[in-house]
């Protein structure tokens, strides 16, 4: 009987700890996670505009010629 009570108590403590962690992580201010305009413009300058690749023309091959 003692072992069953100990396991149940550990499960209750574990579930309370997980709920506390979820509340702490969920309560973070989500506005801090976004990029500022300066960071966004620097990323677009470094990585490109993000508009994607141009469409493939009719006579272009998609594999290299070996």
Image (cartoon, rainbow, N blue to C red):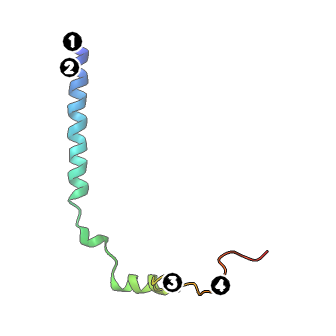
Q: Which residue is mark 3?
A: 46
Farthest front residue in view: 58
The disc placed on residue 60 is: 4
Q: Residues within 10 Å of mark 4 (few under 14, many from 20)?
A: few
The percent position of residue 56, horizontal first and vertical second, equals 57, 84
Is residue 29 positioned above or below 2 on the image? below
Q: Earlier in the sequence, mark 4 or mark 1?
A: 1
Residue 25: quadrant of the picture: bottom left
Please tell me which residue is depicted at 20% across the width and 59% down the height of the picture: 27
Q: Is residue 58 left or right of residue 7?
A: right
Residue mark closest to the camera, 4 vs 1: 4
Please tell me which residue is depicted at 34% across the width and 77% down the height of the picture: 35
Please tell me which residue is depicted at 23% across the width and 18% down the height of the picture: 4
The percent position of residue 52, horizontal first and vertical second, equals 48, 82
Dot 2: element = helix
Is residue 31 positioned above or below 7 on the image? below
Please tell me which residue is depicted at 65% across the width and 77% down the height of the picture: 62
Q: CA distance from mark 4 to mark 2?
A: 71 Å
Dot 4: element = loop
Q: Residues within 10 Å of mark 2 (few under 14, many from 20)?
A: few
Q: Earlier in the sequence, mark 4 or mark 2?
A: 2
The disc placed on residue 1 is: 1
Residue 50: quadrant of the picture: bottom left
Q: CA distance from mark 3 to mark 4?
A: 28 Å
Q: Earlier in the sequence, mark 3 or mark 2?
A: 2
Q: CA distance from mark 4 to mark 1?
A: 76 Å
Q: CA distance from mark 1 to mark 3?
A: 64 Å
């Amino acid at each position: 009987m003692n072992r069953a009570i100990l396991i149940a108590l550990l499960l209750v403590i574990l579930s309370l700890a997980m709920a506390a962690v979820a509340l702490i992580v969920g309560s973070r201010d989500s506005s801090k996670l976004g990029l500022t305009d300066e960071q966004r413009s620097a990323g677009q300058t470094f990585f490109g505009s993000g508009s994607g690749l141009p469409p493939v023309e009719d006579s272009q091959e998609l594999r290299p010629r070996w």
